[in-house]
Image (tube, grey):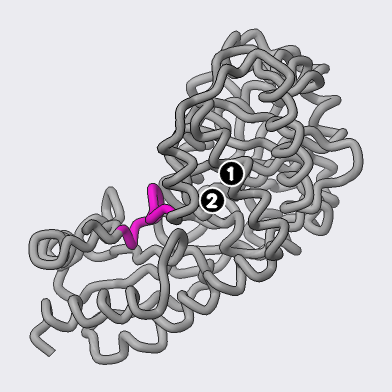
């Protein structure tokens, strides 16, 4: 049986699999609207969204939500500020380039944590309209501190868009506390569902900006989603099956407590990091998310270890891409995992190194 210590998709829970195996219901009716309304309510609770916030479900990956945020908040007269600390920070920049949106990048060195001084230096007293940041740069496992992002957004007066795609339910994501105007996440991460749904939570200030910018994109334009969400619907056919599992998963999370879900991920992350001391690998010193543990290799063995684990144990981990492809791998702690599973992974890694 495949064991996914990846960062999405991840091992799903048995309860979710049972719901996913059921027939898909018809969706243009009151019953499905009530499903959507329940999701909206519970998602708002899960991120502590400010009063008057709205929730949108896009049938896309998380990158669809990233692009939607850019094109619905920025026009040709806007200037965006992008925290670029890896592949996903770079993706925000690439989206801005594709849509001819001016942007200032704050490049974060690999071995350093983001600081407000870095952002101020990159800004250089210029005016910006929107800040785009991946709160957890998933490509290298680095987590940014929410307080410095909040302080910087308050200093600049800019709208703060937080990609929490891999951080939601692994780390505390309190939308009101961090002063975020948009939170983005996706179904295949800590929610442990099929890939295909991106969830966006918009504050009242973000909603005003969306209505002001008037995006011309048909599928990713948010005005239509906001209008149809008033009746618990979407302008286009959604991924109905995933939405049914999302309804149940969010209900369970709210009933058992968001903090308990985060604490479970934290416990798994701490256990793994504590028990890999025999391995000839290093964990970076920068601030880490509970979502995953990045490990650095001395002999460029990331791909070799990945292949060994798949062939001998049917265990999957996630090597990094680009220049880090051979020397960095990511071990996920989200999804349906426990201590016994992590110990099996550690023993398999020790087998690779013949320890």
Return the x and y of residue 221 as percentages of the image width and height: 65, 16
Residue that label 1 marks: 185
**Nearer mark to the viewer, of 2 and 1:** 2
> 11 and 156: which one is in front?
11
Q: How busy is the neighbourhood of tag 1: few (under 14 within 10 Å), some, or many (20 plus)?
A: many
- Residue at horizontal 69 percent and vertical 15 percent from the top: 29
Give the magenta-colored segment's residue range.
4-12
Return the x and y of residue 260 as percentages of the image width and height: 65, 70
Q: Earlier in the sequence, mark 2 or mark 1?
A: 1
- Please state, as top left, top right, bottom left or bottom right, where the C terminus lies in the image: bottom left
Residue that label 2 marks: 191
Q: For numbered disc 2, what is the local secondary structure?
A: loop
- Please state, as top left, top right, bottom left or bottom right, where the N terminus lies in the image: bottom left
Check whether the beta carbons of the residues at disc 2 and disc 1 lie within 8 A of each other: yes
Give the Cα distance between marks 2 and 1: 9 Å
Q: Is residue 160 above or below residue 234?
A: below
Return the x and y of residue 315 as percentages of the image width and height: 22, 63
> 240 and 15: which one is in front?
15
**Picture quarter containing residue 214?**
top right
Q: Is residue 128 above or below residue 277?
A: above
**Picture quarter containing residue 32?**
top right
The answer to whether residue 107 is magenta is no
């Amino acid at each position: 049986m495949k064991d996914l210590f990846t960062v999405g998709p991840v091992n799903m829970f048995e309860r979710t699999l049972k719901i996913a195996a059921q027939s898909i219901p018809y969706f243009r009716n009151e019953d499905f609207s009530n499903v959507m309304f329940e999701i909206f309510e519970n998602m708002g609770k899960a991120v502590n969204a400010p009063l008057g916030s709205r929730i949108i479900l896009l049938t896309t990956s998380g990158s669809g939500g990233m692009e939607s945020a850019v094109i619905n908040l920025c026009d040709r007269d806007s200037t965006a500020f992008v925290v670029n600390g890896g592949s996903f920070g770079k993706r925000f920049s690439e989206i801005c380039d594709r849509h001819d949106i001016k942007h200032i990048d704050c490049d974060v060195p690999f071995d350093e944590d983001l600081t407000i001084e870095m952002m101020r230096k990159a800004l250089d007293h210029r005016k910006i309209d929107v800040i785009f940041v991946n709160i957890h740069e998933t490509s290298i496992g680095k987590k940014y501190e929410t307080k410095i992002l909040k302080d910087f957004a308050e200093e600049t007066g800019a709208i703060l868009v937080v990609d929490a795609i891999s951080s939601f339910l692994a780390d505390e994501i309190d939308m009101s506390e961090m002063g975020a105007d948009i939170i983005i996440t996706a179904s295949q991460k800590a929610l442990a569902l099929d890939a295909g749904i991106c969830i966006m939570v918009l504050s009242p200030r973000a909603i005003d900006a969306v209505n002001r910018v008037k995006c011309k994109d048909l599928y990713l334009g948010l005005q239509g989603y906001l209008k149809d969400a008033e009746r618990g619907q979407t302008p286009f056919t959604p991924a109905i099956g995933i939405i049914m599992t999302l309804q149940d998963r969010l209900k369970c999370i709210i009933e058992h407590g968001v903090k308990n879900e985060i604490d479970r991920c934290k416990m798994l992350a701490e256990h793994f990091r504590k028990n890999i001391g025999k391995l000839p690998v290093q964990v970076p010193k920068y601030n880490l998310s509970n979502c995953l543990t990045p490990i650095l290799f001395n002999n460029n063995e990331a791909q070799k270890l990945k292949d060994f684990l798949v062939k001998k144990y049917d265990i999957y981990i996630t090597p990094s891409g680009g220049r880090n492809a051979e020397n960095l791998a990511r071990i996920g702690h989200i999804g349906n995992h426990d201590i016994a599973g992590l110990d099996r992974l550690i023993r398999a890694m020790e087998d690779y190194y013949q320890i």
